[in-house]
Amino acid sequence: MADEQSLVIFQVGRKTLALPLQEVEHILSLGGEEGRQGISAEGSMILFQGQAIPWRPLWDPLGEPSVFREFDELAQTLPRRRQDHLDWMAALEQSLRHDIPFTKAHSPRECAFGQWFYAFRTEDRRLALLLSQFEHPHALVHGLAEVLLGQVAAGRREEALAALEAARQGVLAELLALFDTVIALVPTLKRPLALILNDSGQRTALGVDRVLDIRSVTAAEVHPARGRLGSLVPQAFIGDSASGGALIPLLAASQLASLG
């Protein structure tokens, strides 16, 4: 190995791996316009510079769920949780008008969204910032139940119904707008990459989560290969000072291209 070598260090799920930079022709964002137009319907090829090339997503072969999986789950969950709160308000209105027992969650921590919200953690700063704005309006919505049911019990039904309508136009609308904003944001957060390899004109696209770094390493940072990494045989291991000295497997592009 030369005294210094340039590497692409990338992430697939929880795994951090490295490839020689000279084996990577291009890094294509699949969240960008080029990437969105490039993957074929059957999912086995990707278009790059007008050429159909094999598409090898690495998540399943390496046994790693994508770090973007949480966004897929959010895309399914959030519309349902939004509808839950429309249903919650409708049920409260029926209780106020017709003295039907109100059986939905009074506490913002007890509804399905609240249980998810207070347990959810994300490393995405934009998502975390938006989600932090839910707590106050969400608590206000759930706080309506005790207050308005109490007003009805005290013989102030019309006052309670007027307050409910004001809340529907105010705090509920604010909460629904937050849901809409996050639902629209989620697809833009999922931006996996394709590493375009070129082996003597034979191209392959590897699906990965993120490129963490492109850097040169010296011979002192390269450690001899030892053992296997599942079905892969590393060429060497690279010392990674950014993660406390953890060793990153250096792989040959041909090994990864043969997976899938």
Image (cartoon, rainbow, N blue to C red):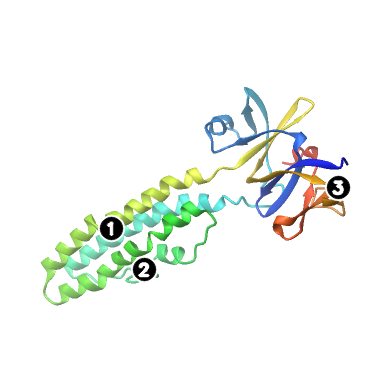
Q: Report the residue at 25% width, 68% height from top.
A: 144
Q: Residue furthest bottom?
A: 154
Q: Which residue is mark 1?
A: 172
Q: Position of residue 17 (x, y in %)?
A: 73, 48
Q: Report the residue at 54% width, 38% height from top.
A: 31
Q: Secondary structure at mark 3?
A: helix
Looking at the rendered structure, the number of numbered marks drawn on it comes to 3
The answer to whether residue 36 is left or right of residue 106 is: right
Front in this rendered view, residue 69 or 197: 197
Q: Position of residue 53 (x, y in %)?
A: 68, 28
Mark 1 or 3 closer to N-term?
1
The answer to whether residue 70 is left or right of residue 22 is: left
Q: Report the residue at 62% width, 40% height from top.
A: 193
The quarter of the rendered structure image containing the C terminus is: top right
The quarter of the rendered structure image containing the N terminus is: top right
Mark 1 or 2 closer to N-term?
2
Q: Residue furthest top?
A: 50
Residue 108's label in the rendered image is 2
Could you classify mark 1 by the number of other residues whose Cα lies within 10 Å: few (under 14), some (14-19), or many (20 or more)? Answer: many
Report, in whole angstroms, how far the alpha carbon at label 1 lies from the one at label 2.
13 Å
Is mark 1 in CB contact (under 8 Å) with mark 3? no
Q: Which residue is mark 3?
A: 219
The answer to whether residue 190 is left or right of residue 239 is: left
| Among the 4 quarters of the image, the one containing residue 88 | bottom left
Front in this rendered view, residue 227 or 23: 23
Question: Identity of the amino acid at label 2?
Answer: Pro
Mark nearest the camera among 1 and 3 is 3
Q: Position of residue 75 (x, y in %)?
A: 46, 49
Mark 2 or 3 closer to N-term?
2
Report, in whole angstroms, how far the alpha carbon at label 1 lies from the one at label 3.
61 Å
Question: Identity of the amino acid at label 3?
Answer: Ala
Question: Identity of the amino acid at label 1?
Answer: Leu
